[in-house]
Image: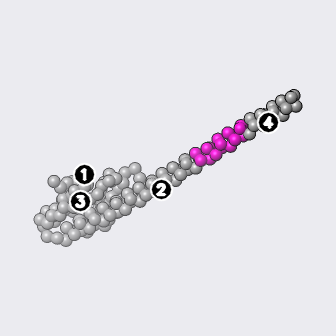
């Protein structure tokens, strides 16, 4: 009986060691899966940030070309010509005028676009940059918010 008792106690200690080893291996696997999950979230976030920056760049470039082309078109049209345009402004950029150029500036970044203009006789009074009215009055282009 004592021999059986000794064998039985050795079996239990081996079983306890195996249970301890299995739980450590389980924790290592959980840690690896968690690390992979965090890495996947990081990669997805970086991709989304890059895509958003590209969308912002494309929208700004498109709007600066559209507004610049419209100003150039109005500069060669007769007086009292009016044009209303709709610009997308999802990223809160703004326009400035300098000599014969239209500058679109995106705040909080180093991105800006220049578009050459045919005239420097422009009065830019628009503030919302969404729905804009352009009028040519006495060879002077007036840009305001449209109603």
What is the CA distance from the residue labelled 3 to the residue labelled 1? 11 Å
Q: According to the image, label 4 marks what residue? A: 11
Question: Which label belongs to residue 128?
Answer: 1
User: Which is nearer the N-term, disc 2 or disc 3?
Assistant: 2
Question: Which label belongs to residue 102?
Answer: none
Predominant SS of the magenta segment = helix
Q: Is residue 100 magenta?
A: no
Q: Which residues are magenta?
A: 19-35
Residue drawn 32% across the image and 59% down it: 103
Quadrant where the N terminus is found in the figure? top right
Report whether 1 appears left or right of 83: right
For discs 2 and 3, the disc positioned in front in the rendered view: 2
- Can residue 123 be seen here? The reply is no
Residue drawn 14% across the image and 70% down it: 78
Dot 4: few (<14), some (14–19), or many (≥20) neighbours within 10 Å? few
Residue 115 vertical placement versus 37 (above, below) = below
User: Which is nearer the N-term, disc 4 or disc 3?
Assistant: 4
For discs 3 and 1, the disc positioned in front in the rendered view: 3
What is the CA distance from the residue labelled 4 to the residue labelled 3? 81 Å
Answer whether labels 2 and 3 touch (C-beta < 8 Å).
no
Q: According to the image, label 3 marks what residue? A: 86
Residue drawn 21% across the image and 57% down it: 132
**SS of the residue under disc 3:** strand
Q: According to the image, label 2 marks what residue? A: 47
């Amino acid at each position: 009986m004592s021999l059986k008792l000794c064998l039985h106690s050795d079996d239990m200690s081996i079983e306890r060691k195996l249970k301890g080893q299995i739980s450590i291996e389980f924790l290592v696997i959980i840690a690896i899966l968690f690390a992979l999950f965090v890495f996947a979230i990081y990669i997805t976030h970086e991709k989304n940030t890059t895509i958003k920056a590209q969308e912002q760049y494309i929208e700004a470039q498109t709007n600066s070309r559209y507004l610049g082309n419209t100003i150039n078109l109005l500069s060669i049209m007769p007086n009292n010509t009016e044009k209303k345009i709709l610009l997308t402004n999802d990223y809160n950029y703004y326009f400035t005028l300098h000599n014969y150029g239209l500058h679109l500036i995106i705040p909080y970044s180093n991105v800006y676009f220049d578009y050459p203009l045919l005239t420097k006789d422009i009065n830019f009074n628009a503030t919302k940059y969404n729905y804009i009215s352009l009028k040519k009055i006495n060879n002077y282009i007036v840009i305001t918010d449209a109603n």
